[in-house]
Amino acid sequence: MGIKFQWLGHSAFDMHIDGHSVVFDPFLTGNPLAATTPEMLSPELILLSHAHGDHLGDTVAIAQASGAPVVANVEISKWLFEHGVKNAQGQNSGGLGDYGFVTVKLTIAFHSSSFPDGSYGGNPNGFIVTARESGQRLYFAGDTALFSDMALIGDERIDVAFLPIGDYYTMGTADSIRAIKYIRPRFVVPMHYNTAPPISQDASGWANRVSNETSAVPIVLDPGGEFSVPRVV
């Protein structure tokens, strides 16, 4: 089956991994690009990169309605427990968790992290997710600056990478190109852009640079758009 994903706007994705639904950073309420509503999602697993409101989003409501475990750092997991989420898995940077149909490894991310009330949200993270059945592997960077250890992530043989390109709060187009060269994915998907004026970007121009300067295939979606990652023959 492999990996199929739908961009829900900003950094929110509904991914189907070997037929199982995994939601990433479900910021939908208040997201002007949101392609669905929290009530329409019923994931088996939720991955939350950090505590900022434009990533935490509707995590509590979706987790409570679906019963899906939430994978996040220890500080976020504690906060989720205190806000009514019964199953929060408090991993930490470098740690690997086995969730049956996938394994999830937390990577570092260079950013900040605090809850909407200003309280500390722990270190931000990215995720390396490996599908047990198909063996396909994705890297979801979360919000991050460029860092040279992305080359180590590239050694994991990433099929598809999800990278912020908005600039201002995260790395922008130029640094994302450098990141792609480090990570060496087969496909790369932009995120965290065009949600608000400070992070407006020309995704077509970005895609042209990716095609001309890297070995990756750029996948630019409109909110609600879908893509299936082909298997290596």
Image (cartoon, grey):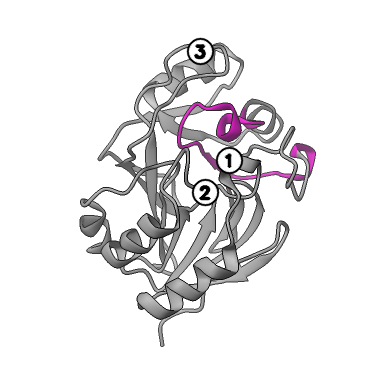
Which residue corresponds to the image point at 58% horizontal and 22% vertical from the top-left? 85
Q: Of the residues tagged 1 and 2, which is closer to the observer?
A: 1
**Mark 2 Cα shell of 10 Å, populated few (<14), some (14-19), many (≥20):** many
Q: Which mark is residue 118?
A: 3
Label 1 amino acid? Pro
Which residue corresponds to the image point at 52% horizontal and 19% vertical from the top-left? 115
Residue that mark 2 sits on: 166
Per the model, the C-alpha gap separating discs 2 and 3 is 23 Å
Which residue corresponds to the image point at 39% horizontal and 42% vertical from the top-left? 144
Residue 2 showing in the rendered view: no
Query: For residue 153, which quarter of the picture?
Result: bottom left
Query: For residue 91, which quarter of the picture?
Result: top left
Residue 219 position within the rendered picture, expressed as x and y whole percent measured from the top left: 55, 70
Asked if the residue under mark 2 is in contact with the one under mark 1, i.e. CB atoms within 8 Å, the reply is yes
In the picture, which quadrant includes the C terminus?
bottom left
Image: magenta residue range: 38-59
Q: Of helix, strand and loop, which one carries label 2?
A: loop
Label 3 amino acid? Gly
Residue that mark 1 sits on: 198
Residue 83 position within the rendered picture, expressed as x and y whole percent measured from the top left: 59, 14
**Mark 1 Cα shell of 10 Å, populated few (<14), some (14-19), many (≥20):** few
Which sits earlier in the primary sequence, circle 3 or circle 1? 3
Residue 81 position within the rendered picture, expressed as x and y whole percent measured from the top left: 52, 16
